[in-house]
Amino acid sequence: TCGGEGRIVREPCTDCHGEGRLSGETTIKVSVPAGVSEGNYIPLQGQGNAGQRGGPPGDLIVLIEEQPHQYFSRSGDDIIYDLNISFPMAALGGGIEIPTLTGKAKLTIDPGTPPGRMLRMRDRGLPHLNSHGRGDQLVRINIWVPAKLSSKEKELLKQLGTTEHIVPSEEERHGHSKTFFDKVKDTFS
């Protein structure tokens, strides 16, 4: 009758039926430290379900889930930003303003920057969770190819495409550009 508790509730509450707790929800504020990532959790002692028959409350475990960002992806404490630039900027270089976590910043593109190159912006990433410092922002260079061209633009590109330094050599076309050491080896053999 007593369920092993050694006492019987003679007039149980009509709301909790003698259990001493009610089902409900509460909204609480949680302080999330900078740098947490997907799968991290925050234990909040005493914020969980009420204990049975007046026992102490349990803990609430807050599991962190990350929403995708419009511009950035994450790799540990580093963030990655894909930057589309034109062929002239990749060939000639120049400065461009890009977004960071703390606002806009100027990035310098060196002349001859190939697609796929990763440029590093130090200390522009996420804060380290349990230490000082920040990760980096990595900028992956992509060459933007226009889908529509005017007849004048097409003619200019055709002319440019016949010049010596614009068309890749046979080795470069297959992804095998010669290094300095390859050229020295060819000279002496």
Image: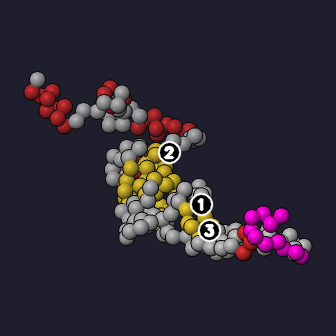
Does 141 appear above or below 13? Answer: above
Q: Residue at x 52, y 56 (%)?
A: 72
Main SS of the magenta part reads loop
Q: Closer to us: mark 1 or mark 3? A: 3
Q: Which residues are magenta?
A: 1-11
Amino acid found under the numbered disc labelled 1: Leu
Query: Label 1 to label 3, Cα distance in Å?
Result: 13 Å
Image coordinates of residue 64 in percent, x first then y, are 58, 60
Q: Residue at x 57, y 67 (%)?
A: 43
Which label is found at residue 59? 3
Q: Which residue reaches farthest top?
A: 189
Whichever of labels 3 and 2 marks the residue nearer the N terminus, that label is 3
Q: Residue at x 44, y 66 (%)?
A: 129
Splitting the image into 4 quarters, where does residue 160 fall?
top left
Is label 2 in a helix, a strand or a loop?
Answer: loop
Q: In the drawing, does residue 24 fall left or right of residue 114? A: right
For disc 1, the neighbor class at 10 Å (few under 14, some 14 to 19, many from 20) is: few
Which residue lies under the disc numbered 2?
144
Colour mapping: secondary structure
Q: Closer to us: mark 3 or mark 2? A: 3
Is label 3 in a helix, a strand or a loop?
Answer: loop
* Viewer-closest of 160 and 76: 76
Query: Label 1 to label 2, Cα distance in Å?
Result: 39 Å
